[in-house]
Image (tube, helix red, strand yellow):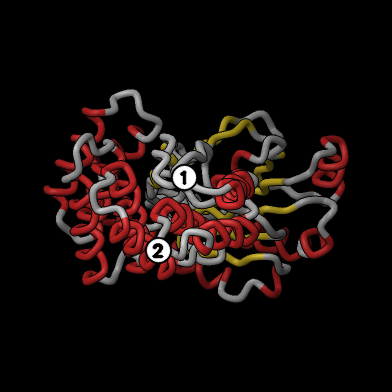
C-alpha cells in the first residue's frame, strides 16, 4: 500500500526488532533476533546502525548499513539478509525482498526464528506482486506461508496472512478457517476486527474496501462510513493553505449543486488545517454547503494514506474505494465526475433490485 488504491487487508509483517506500524497497513511483531553472528566491532557497529536507521524509517541509509555489515561477513550473514528483506519491504522493492529472504533461508536453515520471518516476508512480497489478481504468485505465497507455519511455535499472524491469501485465491472456506484460527489464537489481537470482517465478507480480501472512519462534522452531526452504506461518497482532502484546493472551490460548489438532489450522493471535505478558525471562516465565506470535518489528529488522512492535496476519492454504495486523484486541482482530476455518475447509476440499480 495513492500511488494506487490502498489494500483493504492488513498484511502482517513479522519484524526483527521494530515494533511500530509501517506506512502501508502492516502490523509488525517484534521479537529480538538471536545473536547468530559475532565478530569485530565494525560489523556490530554497522548492524546496529542499520537497525537504528530502520527504526527512524531512513530505509535507504539502513540498506547501506546492512550491506556494509554483510560485506564484513563475506556476504554470508543470515541476519543481515533478514534485515535487508525487512528494509526492502518497507521500500516496496518486493523482488529484492524475495531474493534476500531466500538467501537468509539458505544461510540459516535450522534457525527457526529467522526462517519464520524470512518465509513471512517472502510470502507477503509475493502477495504484493500478485496484486490480488495473479493466481500463480498467490499460490506461491500460499506455499511460502505454509512453510512458515510448519516451523515450531509459528506466530498466529502467519495464519492471518495465509487466510487472506486463500481468500484472494477465491478459496473462501479455507481462508475463513485460517482467519478463524487466527482469531481463536489471538482473541484480543489488534487485527481481530479486520479478520472478523473478512470472515463475514470474504470479498474484503479481494476488493479495495475503504477504511472505516467516523467523525463529528462542523455542523455537529455524527458521520460514519457504516452509516453511509448505500451512498456514493466523494471525499475531498484539502486545506485552506493549499492553493489548488482553494482554487477548486467554485468547481466543487457546482459539483455539489449538481448532485445534492440525489439521495445517494454525499460529499465530504476533510481538512488538514491546524487553524480551526481559519477553516471555519473559509468554509462559511465560500458557501461550502457540504459536510466538513477538520482532521486535526490526521487519523482519517493516515487511514487513506493521504500525502498530497487536494486528493479526491470516490467510495461506492458498497463501501469499495473506486477512484482517486492526487495532488491536482478539480479540473485536473480526470475521470472524477465520470466515476461519480457511474457509481450513482450502479447504486440506483442496486436499490431498485432490492
Residue 252 vertical placement versus 153 (above, below): below
Total residue callouts: 2
Secondary structure under badge 2?
Answer: helix
From the viewer's perspective, tell me whether residue 266 is left or right of residue 241: left
In this figure, which residue is indicated by the disc labeled 2? Answer: 100
Q: Please give the name of the residue rendered at 19% of the width and 35% of the height, measured from the top-left corner.
A: 181
Residue 226 vs residue 198: left or right? right
Classify 10 Å Cα crowding around label 2: few (below 14), some (14-19), many (20 and above). many
Any part of residue 267 in sight: no
Point out residue 238 in the picture as x, y percentages from the top left corner: 72, 53
| Residue at the (29%, 46%) spot, across then down | 116
Q: Point out residue 22 in the picture as x, y percentages from the top left corner.
A: 53, 47
Tag 2 near tag 1, CB within 8 Å: no
Q: Residue furthest front?
A: 40
Crowd class of label 1 (few under 14; some 14 to 19; many from 20; radius 10 Å): few
Image x and y of residue 290, in percent: 67, 47
Q: Secondary structure at mark 1?
A: loop
Q: Work out whether residue 272 or residue 264 is closer to the camera in this orientation and state it.
A: 272
Residue carrying label 1: 38
Q: Is residue 11 visible?
A: yes
Which residue does the image show at 83% across and 51% down from the upper left? 240
Amino acid at each position: 500500500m495513492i500511488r494506487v488504491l490502498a489494500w483493504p487487508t492488513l498484511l502482517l509483517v513479522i519484524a526483527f526488532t521494530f515494533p511500530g506500524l509501517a506506512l502501508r497497513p502492516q502490523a509488525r511483531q517484534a521479537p529480538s533476533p538471536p545473536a547468530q553472528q559475532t565478530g569485530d566491532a565494525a560489523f556490530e557497529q554497522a548492524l546496529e546502525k542499520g537497525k537504528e536507521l530502520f527504526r527512524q524509517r531512513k530505509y535507504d541509509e539502513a540498506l547501506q548499513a546492512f550491506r556494509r555489515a554483510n560485506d564484513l561477513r563475506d556476504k554470508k550473514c543470515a541476519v543481515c539478509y533478514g534485515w535487508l528483506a525487512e528494509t526492502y519491504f518497507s521500500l516496496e522493492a518486493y523482488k529484492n525482498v524475495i531474493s534476500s529472504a531466500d538467501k537468509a533461508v539458505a544461510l540459516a536453515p535450522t534457525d527457526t526464528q529467522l526462517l519464520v520471518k524470512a518465509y513471512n516476508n517472502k510470502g507477503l512480497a509475493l502477495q504484493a506482486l500478485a496484486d490480488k489478481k495473479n493466481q500463480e504468485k498467490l499460490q506461491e505465497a500460499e506455499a511460502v506461508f505454509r512453510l512458515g507455519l510448519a516451523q515450531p511455535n509459528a506466530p498466529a499472524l502467519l495464519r492471518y496472512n495465509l487466510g487472506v491469501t486463500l481468500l484472494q485465491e477465491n478459496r473462501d472456506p479455507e481462508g475463513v478457517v485460517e482467519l478463524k484460527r487466527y482469531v481463536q489464537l489471538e482473541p484480543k489481537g489488534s487485527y481481530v476486527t479486520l479478520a472478523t470482517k473478512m470472515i463475514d465478507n470474504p470479498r474484503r480480501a479481494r476488493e479495495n474496501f475503504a477504511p472505516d472512519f467516523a467523525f463529528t462534522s462542523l455542523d455537529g452531526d455524527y458521520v460514519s462510513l457504516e452509516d453511509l452504506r448505500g451512498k456514493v461518497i466523494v471525499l475531498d482532502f484539502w486545506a485552506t493553505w493549499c492553493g489548488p484546493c482553494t482554487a477548486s472551490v467554485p468547481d466543487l460548489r457546482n459539483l455539489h449543486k449538481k448532485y445534492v438532489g440525489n439521495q445517494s450522493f454525499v460529499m465530504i471535505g476533510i481538512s488538514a488545517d491546524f487553524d480551526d478558525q481559519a477553516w471555519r471562516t473559509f468554509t462559511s465565506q465560500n458557501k461550502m454547503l457540504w459536510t466538513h470535518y477538520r482532521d486535526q489528529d490526521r487519523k482519517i488522512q493516515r487511514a487513506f494514506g493521504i500525502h498530497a492535496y487536494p486528493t479526491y476519492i470516490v467510495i461506492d454504495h458498497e463501501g469499495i474505494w473506486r477512484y482517486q486523484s492526487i495532488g491536482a486541482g478539480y479540473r485536473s482530476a480526470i475521470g472524477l465526475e465520470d466515476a461519480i455518475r457511474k457509481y450513482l447509476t450502479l447504486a440506483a440499480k442496486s436499490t431498485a433490485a432490492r
